[in-house]
């Protein structure tokens, strides 16, 4: 989990800085904070695979994640708890550019991780890791778009709907 969170944070940070350098109004610090917090719930409830989510349903999974986030944030001073809660809400809503960067970075990092795993494990087990990359949106950033295209090519069409 720590490797994934760091990878997501690095991809998010670089993407935000590159977009900012091209004149896009993006809050890079907010992106980094969101990226670090993006899997906070998993520190308590772990990461659920797609089969588990099918069994319990998306709404139950979201409710569990929100409850876990509140538990983790509870120990923080009021101002930080409120601020990180707002950042997580914004991330979950997925409307802002900052949240979309983090969500795309999360999916991209997962696909990159799948490529790394493909060197070690059977390709039959890895298709699920490639599925999310097909949902990544373009941020008009050629480098990120090209990396996404390369990951999609590397996946060999696995996980495409």
Image (cartoon, rainbow, N blue to C red):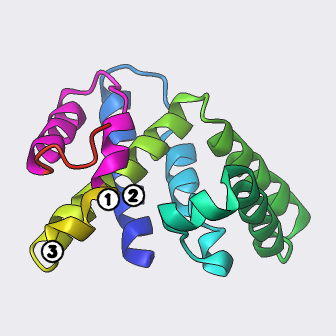
Evaluate whether residue 117 shows in this view: yes
Q: What residue is at 15 percent from the left and 34 percent from the top? A: 146
Evaluate whether residue 13 shows in this view: no
Q: What residue is at 20 percent from the left and 49 percent from the top? A: 158
Residue 28 lies, in percent from the top left, at 48, 42
Disc with the residue nearer the chain's start (1 vs 3):
3
Q: Give above or below for 49 relative to 127.
A: below
Name the disc covering residue 129, or none. Answer: 1
The kind of secondary structure element at disc 3 is loop
Disc with the residue nearer the chain's start (1 vs 2):
2
- Between 155 and 107, the one nearer to me in the picture: 155
Disc with the residue nearer the chain's start (3 vs 2):
2
Q: Which residues are magenta?
A: 130-154
Q: What residue is at 90 percent from the left and 63 percent from the top? A: 78
Name the disc covering residue 122, or none. Answer: 3
The residue under label 2 is 8
């Amino acid at each position: 989990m720590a490797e994934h969170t760091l990878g997501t944070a690095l991809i998010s940070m670089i993407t935000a800085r590159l977009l900012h350098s091209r004149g896009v109004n993006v809050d890079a610090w907010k992106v980094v904070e969101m990226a670090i917090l993006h899997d906070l719930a998993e520190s308590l409830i772990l990461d659920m695979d797609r089969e588990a989510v099918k069994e319990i349903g998306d709404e139950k999974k979201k409710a569990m994640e929100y409850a876990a986030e509140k538990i983790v944030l509870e120990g923080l001073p009021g101002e930080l708890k409120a601020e990180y809660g707002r950042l997580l809400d914004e991330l979950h809503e997925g409307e802002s550019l900052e949240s979309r960067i983090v969500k795309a970075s999360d999916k991209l990092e997962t696909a990159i991780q799948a490529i790394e795993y493909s060197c070690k494990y059977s390709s039959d087990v890895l298709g699920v890791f490639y599925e999310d990359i097909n949902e990544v949106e373009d941020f008009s950033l050629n480098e990120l778009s090209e990396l996404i295209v390369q990951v999609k090519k590397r996946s060999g069409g696995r996980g495409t709907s």
